Amino acid sequence: MFDDLIHVFVPRTYKLSNGKIVKEKVSKSPYIIIILILMVIGCGKIVGFNFSQLIKRGHFFFDMLKKMFPCNWSYWPMMKKAMLDTIIMSILGSVIGCVVALPVSFFLSANFKISKVITVSSRIVITLFRTLPIMVFACFFQLLFGMGTFTGTLAISVFTFTICTKMMYEYIETVDMGAYEAIQSTGASRIKCIWTSIWPQVKGYFFSTVLLTLETNVKSASILGYVGAGGIGIVLDSQLSLRKYSNLGLVVLVMTLTVVALEFLARYGRRKLSDV
Amino acid sequence: MIKLEHVSKVYGNGTKGLDDVSLEIQNGEFVAIIGLSGAGKSTLIRTINKMIDITDGSLTVDGVDVSTLKGKSLRKFRRKIGMVFQSFNLVTKVSVINNVLTARAADMSFLRIFLGLYKKTDKVKALEALDKVGILDKAYIRADQLSGGQQQRVALARTLAQDPEIILADEPVAALDPVMAETVMDDFKRINKEMGITVLINIHHVDLALQYADRIIGIKAGKIVYDGPSSAITEDTLQTIYGRKLTDDEFMKEKK
């Protein structure tokens, strides 16, 4: 066993019964695995992540859970509005972002030969925006428009826009252009050709993208409150700093249920859309 | 009348699509264009409604110089020219009648198209077009659920709903079985005779070309090598067009 382990690194030479010599070829993967393990340990050292801390203080997590549950049901009336805000923010933001993204993505697809300069430059701009996380948009809009759900909705809309645009134009570039050519040959303008021949082909994917962004947006919407962009995040922040664990328990429970419910609905909707 | 005078088309990569082509097609003619793949048949057809720009010469349709058309005037010009394609080019996922109605899109406001509000007269026209090609009963079925032959007839109905004066057909029967190919060719013939629409058709099946067209244009390497009545085609002319003799097997049916 140990002998074989050594020879993972040191190649052996086999002599077959008919006198032929075969030299073993060693795989590189053991070396790569060792390097990866060393890197993980090194990175852990740099950021100060150590397991002893996790073992020593880990049980506090369970203490906290015990304080959170059973949760304080009477806190519901106080957090109801914030929870509803979160859901509405994410739905509205997803819909606005996607609806604005749709015409833009037609414009950015290479199929329609609009203008290479405009297409490429706009794509670069949108790609740059896509590198920013949703919290950065939220912080920025909070400075411009103040605290509240408007800021949150705007942040979600812009974030959704950057993602939906890319998903849509890449999909539009894969559609069949035959029907487009046919309608173009009847003398219809470009926008009419797009709406009659391309839109029917991409609408299922578009609606499914709306639902997909909704799924992720509900999760981000629940922490946007931390930077003053409205929603349940504010409540989460305040109850956590007040150490009101039983209230926190209800917030976490409701949030989890909402996300699971919306994800379930979104997934159901997307399955239904698969043959549209 | 379609008139080409010394028309040439050189593609960006230097390929010659058309090489000094001159011809005249009168209204109401049924013309088949035959030749090898890559000989320039598709290019010839597509220059007529300016889906492809010509690089030299002059092309007029009813006295209108096609090369000067662009934007709105080009779109207006294209409305009277129908086009049928080898791969049908229907909008899949959409009902047959809505496919036919797309032919009316050019004349409608975008708002109506956006909302899918087609006029009653347009719907009647679309249904009549479907009736003309014998698939009225399929009007409310999704186009991708039809067979190839039925799809090509939907495409033909779409073209008819456009009220064209000319129909350009690019290998319309190449993807169909022999029986279906004849049915579709019958449709073309009927449309040509009954409605007086000029039909220009690219076709690989020489026997179908000879059977249905009044006039044959043979094209080879972008040049016209034969232009005359289909009755005057001999084996020698076919040999010039295709570069070698065609065997009996290469005809769909027995030679007459």
Image (spheres, coloured by chain):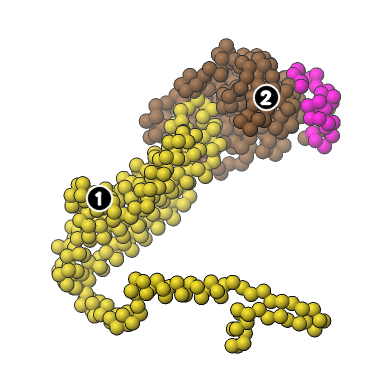
Chain colours: A yellow, B brown
Structural crowding at the residue carrying mark 1, measured as other residues with C-alpha within 10 Å and reported as few (<14), some (14–19) or many (≥20): some
Amino acid type shown at disc 1: Phe
Q: Residue at x 35, y 43 (%)?
A: A99
x, y percentage for residue B199? 64, 22
Q: Secondary structure at mark 2?
A: strand
Check the residue under mark 2 and report the chain it is in: B
Q: Which residue is mark 2?
A: B18
Q: Secondary structure at mark 1?
A: helix
Report whether A29 appears left or right of A71.
right
Query: Residue B25 sits in which quadrant?
Result: top right
Q: Is residue B234 above or below residue A116?
A: above
Front-most of A177 and B164?
A: A177
**Contact between labelled residues 1 and 2, with CB atoms less than 8 Å apart:** no
Amino acid type shown at disc 2: Leu
Gap in angstroms between the C-alphas marked 2 and 1 = 59 Å
x, y percentage for residue B105? 46, 28
Check the residue under mark 1 and report the chain it is in: A
Q: Which residue is mark 1?
A: A140
Q: Residue at x 31, y 60 (%)?
A: A219
